[in-house]
Amino acid sequence: MSCCLLDFGRVQELRQVRDFLFPKHNNAGPEEEKTRAENELTWDDSDWGSWENPDGKEDGAQAEEEEQQQSAPWLQDCVLSLSPCSDLLVIAREHKATFLSAKWLTDESGQEEMTLAVTWSGTLSAEEGECICSVICIPLASQKRSSTGRPDWTCVVVGFSSGYVRFYTESGVLLLAQLLHEDPVLQLKCRTYEIPRHSGVTEQHEELSILYPAALVTIDGFSLFQSLRACRNQVARAAAAGSDVIQPPPLAYKKWGLQDMDTITDHSSIGITTLSVFDQMKNASMLGGFHTSVKGSPPAMSQYITVGGGPYTGFYYAIEGSSQPLLSHVALAVASKLTSALFSAASGWLGWKSKNEEESVQKQKPKVEPATALPVRFGLPDSRRHGESICLSPCNTMAGVTDDFGRVTLLDVARGIAIRMWKGYRDAQLGWVQVSEARGERDLATSPSMPRRHAQFLVIYAPRRGILEVWGTQHGPRVGAFTVGKHCRLLYAGHRLMGVNSVTSQGWQIHTQQVCLFDPVNGALRAVTIPFHLALSDKKSERAKDMHLLRRVTTLLRSREVEPGQTYLINIHDRPCIYMKHIQALESLLSNKNAPVSCLTNVTRALLASLKEQDPEAVDKSLLQFCSSELKLLQLYTDVQLLHTPDTSPTEPEHPSFSGIEEDLARVGPVLQRYTEMNSRPCVSFAQDSSGPLPVRTFLSQLEWVNGELRVIKQPDTDWTQLGSFLFWGCLSGQSPLQRVCETLQESGISPQQLLSLLLSVWLNKEKDVLKYPDAVSHLGTLLSTLSSMKGAVDESWDGQCVSPWWQQVRTACVQSESSAAALLAALVAHRVAKNAITRLGESKFQEEWECVSLELEQWVVCIKQLEDVLALQTLLCLPSPQGSTGGAVTRCSVKTLLESGRGGVADCVSKLIFRQGVSPDLLRDILQRRGENEPLQQGGEEKLEELLECVCQRFPNSLSPDVLFAHCSWENVVQWNKDPEVGQYLEWSVEFLKMISNPHIQFGVSAMMWQTFIVKRFSAAAFLMEKVGKAPKDRLCRRDVGMGDAAVRSFLGSSVQLLQALMEADSAVEQVSAPDVCVEEVWGGAEGPVCSLSSRSASLCVSVTAARRHDLLFQGKSTQFCIYTCTPQ
């Protein structure tokens, strides 16, 4: 891992920006403008191939490149500033400026890219003859509690040659203007809050510093932040209300007159520093002599460094409290200029302002406060050298200075000396990158409270050489070099968000770019990325060698020739290096899909052997444990893979048969056969889902060693089927030795409970494959018997009169599975194994021929009965639907889902199937009447439906009684009709099913629920429409008001009449018949879900609404007949 330049954004419309700032370039003709516009929409490929064949360029391409190179240096004559958040770029020249804001665009490949596009351009100068000298973008932090570190807005601070400093928003609106000095502004710099790394670092305050040729003005960051927010709010309110004058608060500032330097070109504000006692006594002796007095405590001082000439570098110290903050009287000038900027675009509706008043106000200048003299404390004298710029490091300990001799000098800020110098960098541009060390798990475990280390790198851009270099400080080597263009600009803000403090910064993730390289040729913005380890390395560094070897390992693993490079990998792990690199290399190797098991085993064994040969105290225990556990897993994978090989499978004796299993299979045989026939339809399969050997990296990712025990990693989205198939499918299919596989797994340390979960997972999820192997049942019984005999499987204190957790795990898996056949077979086998175990336990205790009765066996009887019922129901639900039918996909059910769906869950599933099959009410009534008779229908499909439905009704005599089934079918049809009202047959069949209900309580309740839920709103809309129109309404009106066509409305009203008639007949018969007793089968009495049975709901409804709705429904029935007569064509 090395330094790199990463493109994170692109600047658009650069040509328009240049034409705006340099009008002399915008003198092309119409043809040239058309060609220029076409070139802007295409890629700039003029210099493609220049590296391969620099001398073979065509004349046209060479001329175009020369023209481009001539036009590229225009950016060097501009003033640039990029926000630290990279969301705003300002390009200014003379009196014009352009603001470019960030936007996210999606390219053709679907990737999002940040682009900077022009959002505002115009003239910023307000005084005659003034021009822009310096620009800085300061993002202001949001004060909302929900903020995560993004800026609220960005303020653009501009310094002019007239001495004015003006503050603008991102849209070019003037917020504040102040004349602080009557000389040109040289530099604007900002210092923002930084979290102290340790308790010894003084917390620095935010500050904006403004440099003039002989003065330095500093504005406190907190007051500036509050003033800018207040001005922005006032401007917004003024623009909305149309007020005339705004009175912004004056800024509090300090003004220092810098003395004892001939010329000053740049500066840096270091912040508040406190000298040590020795330095205090030394300075006092040098300034006051031998007999001078020394104060008890060193005073706090603000340190400033300036560069220029005579001396080359000057160090200034201003004692806190020596100068009072100044408040300038700028209300009149600020108000006039702010009013002019706000309402210049709205002169039409502000006609009360006269031109003479504006000119008189502009001629007035505010009072300029005098500066407090500040002499230079000391400097670096060099009469021939002239400093050009200074760049302060992020931690305020070092600074880089450029001069007119082409040198770059590194200064120690605290000691005031030059500690390093580079030469050959004329017109250099500087920047700093601070990198934090990534903390590993070991560091967090050993010293969680220790602060992280930070490294600083100096970035130097030499435009004349077209190279960007990264140097380690203080005496580090060059760690990176990049060939870039000769007309780029290195943008380094040197600050972050303003308005952040120690309280608001907690929990924020402030993402800012430290150094950015702007290439005007293609508009690319590139960030310099530097890894931390380069600060610790040189050409002989062991860490650099480790990183290089890790890259070699990664490159080798990406290729498919892993096994030939096995020797090289072993040699890499044999050499001593940092333990984290060992773990990273081993993890990369183990997660490689191309590495064979033999290569992984050899490399891991070699690394473990080399670690054991070293000093035990010098070897990291986590690395040793990691290698040991991974080697055990690889050995287990190899052993299981060899056991599943057909050539090595020895012949084993016949599997022991379980008494009674044949009778159970013969009893459920017919249902299993029908279920297999229904699920034998072809289905779509994918290549990656085909059965194959489990990849070793998948095996390693699903197992882990915890406290000497091998455990399966439990994750919510982890599928254990593939791992279970690798361990047990060979045994279930009869291709692997069962006893040897179980012994190998037992010796590996996996708990029997997890082995049981893996076995049940593969058995229940591979139902179709299980049903193909007749001997799979006997193999499953052998595996269950073997696993249950392992130590720790069944509790030794279990006496059969209580529920065993081991067998409860099997029942829980079967009850939750939607593979009905596989779950039933597993329950039958587990029941016989548990019964044999209980029998042996009873014989060992009583020594008599007594039949053992236990609670465990009763649980198995209930579970098997439920699974048999679910299998019959699922066989019915798997019946293929007629072509073109509606009603949804096939419903998959399990014992758990039926118990959770309440007492009406079975009838609800069957009613959905009847609707999907398109069974008419008469046909369903005939099928239920012939229950028990051997006279099936003559049609083939209806014969199968009748057979399966009869089987399910025999198993659910109470849940599928005729009245309950008719009620659910009626409700299902009216639900489907509500989804598609144009199909009137659904509502007609719903009413027919309703009429077949014999119990008036159920009939009245269902009809009342249908009326209130689905019918009454549409019926009222149809009645109001016909009353409004006075005749049969047209199709358009019916669709608008009722939601269906005119033909569907006619059918709907006819069905509504029949519904109301059935409702009135049921209402009259309710008092003569007692309420029904809704009950379910004994094994399904534990349903705890919501009561979804329509019979119980309707029975409870009829008691409460009968008296209240009787007269109302009769009246609505008569009005329905009237509507029918009205709609009937004459």
Image (tube, rainbow, N blue to C red):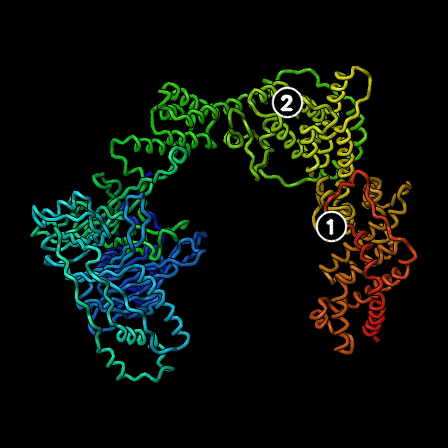
Query: What's the residue at 77%, 62% (across, down)?
Result: 1012
Q: Which mark is residue 313?
A: none
Residue 1124 location, x and y as percent? 83, 71
Residue 922 location, x and y as percent? 86, 53
Q: Is residue 2 left or right of residue 1045?
A: left
Residue pushed farthest right?
A: 1072
Whether 766 is drawn above or below 661: the answer is below
Residue 1014 location, x and y as percent? 75, 62
Question: What SS does tag 1 mark?
Answer: loop
Mark 1 residue type: Gln
Q: Nearer the viewer, residue 607 or 381?
A: 381
Residue 421 location, x and y as percent? 16, 44
**Residue 13 visible, this orientation:** no
Mark 2 residue type: Gln
Question: What SS does tag 2 mark?
Answer: loop
Neighbours of disc 2 within 10 Å: few (<14), some (14-19), many (20+): some
Q: Nearer the viewer, residue 576 or 853?
A: 853
Label 2 belongs to which residue?
735
Mark-to-mark CA distance, 2 and 1 = 42 Å
Label 1 belongs to which residue?
883
Q: Point out the frontmost of discs 2 and 1.
A: 2
Residue 1128 sits in which quadrant? Answer: bottom right
Total tally of numbered discs in the picture: 2
Residue 549 sits in which quadrant? Answer: top left
Whether 728 is drawn above or below 339: the answer is above
Residue 1021 sits in which quadrant? Answer: bottom right
- The N terminus lies in quadrant: top left
